[in-house]
């Protein structure tokens, strides 16, 4: 178990007035143990208790050992919540993570396991701050994504469909030693780019003069990358240049203001004010960014409603966009790591207007 990470979880539990909490989310368990758990429909629960050794309840179909926890097994003829019950302090509130299935929670409530039940985000807050191991993995993951993006650009050719390019993206990641994609790659030609989450199709074919939006990410040693770039296949029109450069300015200005102590809602406002000031505010219809790490969308975001304050070790995306139906969609996305005095952009892939010759 990563004891430094566990200690951070305990600190957040203490801040929330919790002396015990259940962690069941498989990504949170990986964060603490460095091991993957796929329990299916069976209950899995790590019970954290202040000043006591953690208890890990696991079905005996799955073998696991760790000197820093006591592993308690149950079998398919036993009930998971019944097995967990003796280890819960019944006179105290019990924190429940965001992923614990309701069928197990309701069973614990029927057993009067605790005096109260509270949603606990202690593990999610701990995951906000990446430790040195995580930072290095994220830096490498993003570097590999840069290399993959270059290969994707080279794959653009007349006649390729969005779906064919998506399939090529999977092969590119595999060639670069990426275990899997962070999410289904978004490939959008021309007006399809106005849908921020467009699903690539086989009937949209790339032709000279088209615009290409690629939103892609891969998983390196369990840590995700994520980046969006736009390519042109001929000289863009003055209108296309205007929209592209406006999004680029919003991206770069937001990044300039990232440092410890700054509200993430303010970072969102900087990017949004630039786009709104140019008269395109209604076409920027999503938050500025999201946290990322073990999951492509870790808990936490960069939005006007965010209450999060930037702190060293946080990693999140900055991805302003403008989507004008039937005309143009542009998004430019980078991952940033908050440092002690500012931030480091993890993506080094160019953001200048790029024209690709696809007549090969």
Image (cartoon, grey):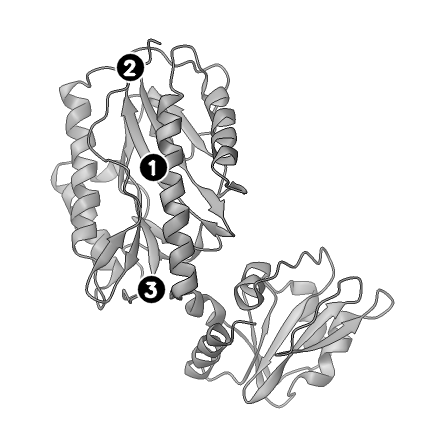
Q: Find residue 247 and report its horizontal and vertical position in percent.
A: 21, 37
- CA–CA distance in space, label 2 to label 1: 20 Å
> Can you say whether 321 is above or below 293 in the image?
above
Q: Quadrant of the N terminus?
A: bottom right
| SS assignment at label 1 | strand
Q: In which quarter of the image is the C terminus?
A: top left
Mark 2 lies on residue: 357
Is any atom of residue 292 visible in this view?
no
Q: How crowded is mark 3: few (under 14 residues within 10 Å), some or many (20 or more)?
A: many
Is residue 234 toward the left or the right of residue 195 in the image? left
Residue positioned 39% across, 49% down in the render:
140
Q: Which of the numbered marks, if any, corresponds to residue 326?
A: none
Q: Which of marks 3 and 1 is in front?
A: 3
Q: Who comes first in sequence, dot 2 or dot 1?
A: 1
Mark 1 lies on residue: 228
Q: Who comes first in sequence, dot 3 or dot 1?
A: 1
Is any atom of residue 199 visible in this view?
yes
- CA–CA distance in space, label 3 to label 2: 40 Å
């Amino acid at each position: 178990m990563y004891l430094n990470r566990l200690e951070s979880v305990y600190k957040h539990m203490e801040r929330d007035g919790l002396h015990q909490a259940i962690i069941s989310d498989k990504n949170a368990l990986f964060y603490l143990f460095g091991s993957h758990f796929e329990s299916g429909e069976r209950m899995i629960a790590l019970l954290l208790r202040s000043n006591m050794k953690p208890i890990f309840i696991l079905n005996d179909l799955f073998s696991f050992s760790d000197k820093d926890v006591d592993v308690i097994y149950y079998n398919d003829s036993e009930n998971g919540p019944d097995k967990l019950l003796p280890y819960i302090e019944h006179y105290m509130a019990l924190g429940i993570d965001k992923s614990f299935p309701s069928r197990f929670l309701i069973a614990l409530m029927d057993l009067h396991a605790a005096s109260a039940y509270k949603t606990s985000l202690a593990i999610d807050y701990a995951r906000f701050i990446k430790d040195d191991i995580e930072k290095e993995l994220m830096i490498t993951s993003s570097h590999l994504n840069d290399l993959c993006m270059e290969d994707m650009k080279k794959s653009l050719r007349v006649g390729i469909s969005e779906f064919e390019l998506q399939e090529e993206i999977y092969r590119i990641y595999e060639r670069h030693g990426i275990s899997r994609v962070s999410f289904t790659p978004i490939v959008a030609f021309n007006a399809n780019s106005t849908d921020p989450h467009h699903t690539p199709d086989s009937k949209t074919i790339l032709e000279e003069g088209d615009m290409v939006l690629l939103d892609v990410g891969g998983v390196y040693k369990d840590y995700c990358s994520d980046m969006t770039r736009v390519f042109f296949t001929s000289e863009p029109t003055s209108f296309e240049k205007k929209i592209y450069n406006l999004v680029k300015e919003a991206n770069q200005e937001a990044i300039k203001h990232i440092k410890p102590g700054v509200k993430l809602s303010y970072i969102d406002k900087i990017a949004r004010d630039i786009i709104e000031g140019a008269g395109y505010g209604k076409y920027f219809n999503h938050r500025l960014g999201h946290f990322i790490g073990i999951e492509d969308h870790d808990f936490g975001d960069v939005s006007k409603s965010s209450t999060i304050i930037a702190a060293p070790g946080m990693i999140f995306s900055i991805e302003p966009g403008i989507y004008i139906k039937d005309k143009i969609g542009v998004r430019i996305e980078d991952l940033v790591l908050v440092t002690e005095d500012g931030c480091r952009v993890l993506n080094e892939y160019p953001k200048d207007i790029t024209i690709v010759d696809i007549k090969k």
